[in-house]
């Protein structure tokens, strides 16, 4: 098997330690990480593999970040103690904290648990300007959970909502009254045209040996909020699809990386239809994209429809199962709709043939004109190059890709490049798809960034990864002006494709985890993490930037964060989520990101007679341990 498949943007919800899938003998056994094929390991969501490493005792690669030293907490910190009716809400200048919970005090061995918020998402009601619904993978209850954050004042303040994902009907799980869920995440949000709001959540059970319960079931859920823009939800959740595995046999496929969209166009024949797409990893080693839809406000759902069909674009099947077609290794699907009711699905595909040291992959797109009942053959949006194998360049986080810094070696959280598509509401035939690429017009052989094939893990390698002025990740855009029939990136190499991140500072620094949206007047807005500011590229710190364009060829940018975010330390520094969000329809952009400027709180070690107290802690290399918080800001879309 050729090891060229990148580690994809997986969502935190797939953090199962034992995964349903393969059987290793005639006796049914629980699925473990070691039973996954090499390709599936590359596709598996980041937190799943991170959890597995921790339980398999492979923490030695964490290095300095894995050892915390207690220090007294700083005084007068406004985010430690509730100050008003807003609870622990706070802000950094124009940057607003969406999750208004007070940070729990965690144990140093569980850094991030009970505290972190990552994999942020944000939607805006197109008919009610200023009504926003955010969400994230939220750890306040200990394990990952689906929480949402609602604002009715254009993002100046938010209130928390605990989405009721704890149990659903147990009818499919041995006929029990209830099926309980241990964890959840992979959230996304959307509004329809009639005032309803929706939250998507993947739920799962970790099984043994994490718990004494062998149940390895998983399910995709959607919650509806009617009349209050996300302040409360239907219960129990409406189930999109599920994989019961109560006995922990590991014989069921595993559902991963789901995203939600709603056809919020009043002119559409499928007005208010709700769509969810995801990846199904099966025991035959395949990973196909599927779609399900609801025509009754998420009450009931269609049977899954295959999206990633056979195509001459897919030439290398890796020896995995091909029962559903030759495009059998896919991940990171995203559904989006056009005013005429067309449903588009864009995703990352790994079945393209490469030669020599080349290690590119491809972005594919299919569309449905019958409300998700069937899909066109895939078309090629663009090629792209994924981020480098982390262990090769940092000595950290084996088996995953990351965004290495150029000096301090503090940046080794899992990261990958993924596509985001959106339709221009003024010109519905104009479709823009953004994707990160490590090889681009600013980062290629001409400045010393050279693809060199693959590491033993199957992840990409390059010359020039930690050399200043050489390799860096750009956000590219591929455009269709014929309703997705062809794209500018179909025949244009990533080295020549339009780069959104083209300012002088960005040309020598990395940008990643983008999201995009069109304004109602046709400007494309794109937000992303960015290392063009200060010493970010050297230290592993990050900022957040918003770019905008009216012609999709020339972009202006604006810094969103009021100060730089230090490299994350929670989850041993390995996990910072897998995506971000953005809503910009009404002309003011509301990007969503996970912010690390808040110190993480721990209980101090005290004697039996001492009163309990709170400490911050430092890593062995002297950095203050930090929290991950869901943030946003209101920023006018910059246009050149």
Image (cartoon, rainbow, N blue to C red):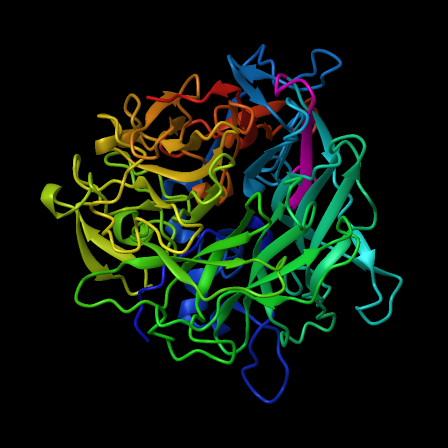
Residue located at (36% from left, 63% from top) = 5
Q: Residue furthest bottom?
A: 26
- Asked whether, in this view, residue 227 is left or right of residue 467, the answer is right
- Residue at 67% across, 39% down: 266
For this orientation, the residue located farthest to the right is 177
Q: Is residue 64 left or right of residue 464?
A: right
Looking at the picture, does residue 208 appear above or below residue 189? below
Which of the two residues, 15 or 275, is positioned nearer the viewer here? 275
Who is closer to the viewer here, 114 or 517? 517
Q: Which region of the structure is painted magenta?
A: 139-156
Residue 541 in picture, x, y percent from top left: 36, 29
Image vertical order of residue 98 relative to residue 178, above or below: above
Query: Looking at the rendering, in which quadrant would you find the N terminus?
Result: bottom left
Residue 452 in view here: yes
Please state, as top left, top right, bottom left or bottom right, where the C terminus lies in the image: top left
**Residue at image x 25%, y 26%?**
503
Q: Residue at x 67, y 64 (%)?
A: 207
Residue 154 spot, x, y in % from top left: 62, 19
* Predominant secondary structure, magenta span: loop
């Amino acid at each position: 098997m050729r090891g060229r498949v990148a580690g994809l943007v997986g969502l935190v919800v797939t953090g199962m330690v034992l995964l349903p899938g393969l059987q290793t003998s005639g006796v049914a056994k629980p699925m473990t990480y070691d039973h996954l094929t090499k390709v599936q390991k590359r596709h598996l969501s980041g937190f799943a593999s991170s959890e597995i490493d921790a339980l398999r005792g492979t923490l030695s690669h964490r290095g300095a970040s894995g050892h915390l030293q207690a220090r007294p907490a700083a005084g007068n910190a406004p985010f430690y103690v509730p100050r008003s009716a807003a609870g622990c809400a706070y802000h950094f200048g124009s940057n607003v904290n969406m999750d208004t919970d007070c940070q729990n005090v965690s144990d140093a061995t569980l850094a991030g648990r009970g505290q972190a918020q990552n994999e942020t998402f944000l939607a805006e009601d197109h008919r009610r300007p200023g009504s926003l619904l955010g969400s994230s993978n939220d750890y306040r209850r200990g394990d990952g959970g689906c929480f949402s954050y609602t604002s009715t004042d254009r993002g100046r303040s938010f209130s928390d909502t605990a989405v009721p994902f704890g149990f659903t009907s147990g009818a499919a799980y041995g006929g029990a009254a209830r099926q309980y869920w241990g964890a959840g995440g992979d959230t996304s949000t959307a509004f329809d045209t009639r005032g309803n709001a929706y939250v998507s959540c993947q739920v799962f059970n970790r099984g043994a040996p994490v718990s004494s319960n062998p149940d390895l079931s998983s399910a995709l859920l959607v919650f509806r909020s009617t009349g209050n823009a996300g302040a409360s939800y239907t219960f129990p959740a409406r189930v999109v699809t599920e994989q019961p595995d109560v006995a922990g046999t590991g014989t069921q496929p595993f559902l991963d990386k789901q995203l939600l969209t709603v056809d919020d166009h009043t002119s559409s024949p499928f007005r208010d239809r709700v769509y969810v797409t995801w990846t199904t990893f099966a025991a035959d080693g395949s990973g196909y994209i599927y779609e399900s839809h609801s025509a009754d406000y998420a009450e009931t759902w269609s049977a899954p429809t295959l999206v990633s069909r056979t195509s001459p674009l897919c030439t290398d099947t890796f020896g995995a199962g091909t029962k559903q077609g030759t495009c059998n290794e896919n991940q990171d699907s995203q559904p989006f709709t056009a005013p005429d009711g067309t449903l588009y699905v864009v995703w990352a595909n790994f079945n393209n043939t490469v030669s020599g040291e080349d290690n590119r992959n491809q972005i594919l797109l299919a569309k449905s004109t019958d409300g998700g009942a069937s899909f066109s053959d895939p078309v090629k949006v663009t090629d792209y190059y994924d981020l480098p194998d982390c262990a090769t360049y940092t000595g950290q986080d084996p088996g995953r890709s990351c965004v290495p810094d150029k000096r301090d070696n503090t940046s080794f959280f899992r990261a990958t490049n993924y596509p985001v598509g959106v339709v221009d509401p003024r010109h519905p035939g104009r479709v823009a798809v953004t994707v990160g690429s490590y090889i681009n017009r600013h980062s290629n052989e001409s400045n010393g960034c050279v693809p060199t094939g693959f590491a033993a893990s199957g992840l990409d390698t390059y010359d020039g990864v930690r050399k200043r002025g050489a390799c860096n990740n750009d956000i590219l855009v591929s455009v269709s002006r014929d309703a997705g029939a062809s794209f500018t990136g179909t025949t244009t190499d990533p080295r020549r494709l339009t780069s959104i991140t083209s300012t002088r500072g960005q040309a020598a620094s990395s940008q990643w985890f983008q999201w995009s949206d069109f304004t109602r007047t046709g400007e494309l807005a794109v937000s992303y993490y960015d290392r063009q500011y200060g010493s970010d590229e050297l230290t592993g710190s990050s900022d957040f930037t918003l770019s905008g364009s009216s012609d999709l060829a020339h972009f202006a940018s604006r810094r969103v964060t009021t100060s730089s975010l230090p490299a994350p330390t929670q989850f041993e520094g390995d996990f910072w989520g897998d995506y971000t969000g953005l809503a910009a329809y009404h002309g003011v952009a509301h990007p969503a990101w996970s912010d690390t400027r808040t110190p993480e709180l721990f209980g101090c070690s005290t004697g039996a007679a001492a009163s309990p107290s709170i400490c911050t802690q430092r890593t062995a290399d002297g950095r203050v341990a930090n929290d991950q918080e869901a943030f946003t800001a209101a920023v006018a879309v910059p246009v050149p």
